[in-house]
Image (cartoon, helix red, strand yellow):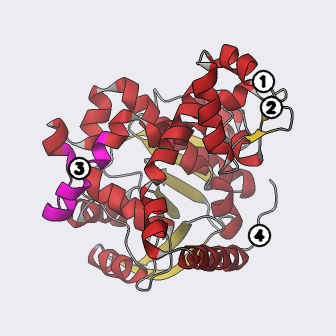
Amino acid sequence: MPALPPARVVRTVEGVRARLQHLTRKLAPAPFALLELAQGSMVTQAIYVAAELRVADALEDGPLTVQELAREVDADPEALCRLLRLLAGYSIFAEQADGRFGLTPMADALRENAPISMRAIAVLMGHPTHWEDWSHLLDSVRTGEPSMPKLRGMGAFEYLEANPAYGKVFIGGMGAMSDTETLPIVAAYDFSRFGTIVDFCGGRGTLLAGILQRAAQARGILYDPRVDTNGAADFLKEEGVADRCTTVDGGLFDAPPAGHDAYILKHIVHDWPRSQALEILKNVREAISEDGRLLLMEMVPPSSGNAPHAAKLVDLWLMLLVGGRERTQEQYAELLAAAGFRLERVVQTAAAISIVEARPC
């Protein structure tokens, strides 16, 4: 696995970037700085169109003229040129002296087969359904309730099931974002001290596979309601950990396999209001060994202050869709105590995600 910088170095760099962005906005008259931020949704749509057309994939072998590129992606040459001209101003694609357009590092990340591809995320962020969801944020802020039941007549999870085309887009985007967190997590925490690790509702086992590859003596249990249909068995075999991993079919609010050393819940608790979150955690408390560890993989925003943090945006998204939330360290300590756990520490990673470690009490 490639080396990652320590989390403290990443936080320092993020702090420098935040200060530079703050300075940039201060250098412009406040109304115009605000206007630039308000127009960000239009840039999102432009990135989405480029991702849908697979412009970056068409440029993988080198720069092309607009006419050549338009033929490749089935677009109008003049309209495509206008799109790329805008994106080039944000360092996404670049126009060369001869008029051809080529990839930049950010444009390269829009390729589907890029080492760390953002294409699926870009397609989700610009999708009409996603935009319609966010157009009802005002309702959620006024009421404090998710807008999805009113807008769709059903909850978010039910809607994804009932609309498989959008469900595929949503799960693809979320999966791509989640995959970027695996390496930072396994680099930040020593999982080798555990004998058996239960990945609670862990999908097809991306994180568990990464952990078992690093912790060569550990065994894993992948617990998920779709474990028999989501390709988990083939994936774990491809990752070389199938001989140390058992798959168990089970639901989010069911009791997981009991008596093991570590229970991982990645982006599970944040989806739910307090009552459902407690139900999930209490089921894990019943199952975990008395000397075991509960490891919640979540974004943990700062308790106060104006520093930017990815969790602050995701927190609004959760409020809008499912009524969940990102919780501060203090909020996790209180929630965990109510479920029978004691918060031990919060381990930062090189990504925005942290590891909230707790033990039974």
Gap in angstroms between the C-alphas marked 3 and 2: 42 Å
The kind of residue tagged 1 is Thr
Where's the C terminus, which quadrant? bottom left
Q: In the rendering, at what x and y percent does residue 19 appear?
A: 61, 80
The kind of residue tagged 2 is Gly
Q: Is residue 3 above or below residue 103?
A: below
194 or 279, which lies in front?
A: 279
Q: In the rendering, at what x and y percent does residue 274 appear?
A: 24, 67
Q: Counting residues from the N terminus, which is met first, the one under dot 2 or under dot 1?
A: 1
The residue singled out by tag 1 in the image is: 65
Start-end of magenta stretch:
132-148
The residue singled out by tag 3 in the image is: 136
Secondary structure beneath dot 2 equals: loop
Q: Say which of marks 3 and 2 sits in front.
A: 2
Name the disc covering residue 5, or none: 4
Q: Counting residues from the N terminus, which is met first, the one under dot 2 or under dot 4?
A: 4
Residue 80 drawn in magenta: no
